[in-house]
Image (cartoon, grey):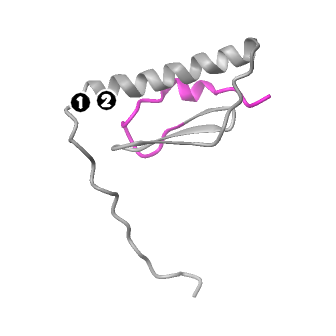
Amino acid sequence: MGKKMSKKNDSFTPFANEADVAGIGNLMLENRVDRITISGDVDLTADKPGLEQARRLHALLGQVVDALEARELPDRLPPPEVQTIANPFA
């Protein structure tokens, strides 16, 4: 069974910073100020732990939707800036 979400994730505020990460199983929601990156996987099993994980995922995604609905949104964000740096190992 996947890992449970820790209490730290209860304070996840979407778009608040570039540091917070919330996890459910191996699914990670990474905070950015202009986007939330979701990666990994989680099995939502047909049992009580699966229901708990589904509720946590639902709550986190609900927070994301609420935060988006509370903002004035552009039609589309520009692509993120990509910077090339010198290889420190070269």
Badge 1 element: loop
Which residue position holds label 1?
A: 71
Where is residue 26 drawn, in percent x and y?
Answer: 68, 38
**Residue 31 vs residue 64, the one in the foreground:** 64
Q: CA distance from mark 1 to mark 2?
A: 5 Å
Badge 2 element: helix
Q: Residue furthest bottom?
A: 90
The label number, if any, that marks residue 68 in the structure image: 2
Read off the magenta span.
1-21
Disc 2 crowd rating (10 Å Cα; few below 14, some 14-19, many 20+) is some
In this picture, is 19 found above or below 57?
below
Specify the amino acid type for callout 2.
Answer: Leu
* Left or right position of 31 against 8: left
Task: Inspect the magenta stretch and tell me whether residue 9 lies in it.
Answer: yes
Residue at the image position 52 percent from the left and 81 percent from the top:
87
**Residue 76 vs residue 82, the one in the foreground:** 76
**Residue 18 vs residue 63, the one in the foreground:** 63
Where is residue 78 drawn, in percent x and y?
Answer: 27, 54
Residue at the image position 62 percent from the left and 19 percent from the top:
54
Task: Inspect the magenta stretch and tell me whether residue 63 lies in it.
Answer: no
The label number, if any, that marks residue 31 in the structure image: none
Specify the amino acid type for callout 1.
Answer: Arg
Where is residue 43 drawn, in percent x and y?
Answer: 71, 29
In this picture, is 64 found above or below 55?
below
Residues at discs 1 and 2 in contact (Cβ within 8 Å): yes
Locate the C terminus and report the quarter of the image it occupies: bottom right
Q: Residue furthest right?
A: 1
Disc 1 crowd rating (10 Å Cα; few below 14, some 14-19, many 20+) is few
Quadrant of res 24: top right
Quadrant of res 52: top right
Where is residue 83 drawn, in percent x and y?
Answer: 38, 71
Locate the N terminus and report the quarter of the image it occupies: top right
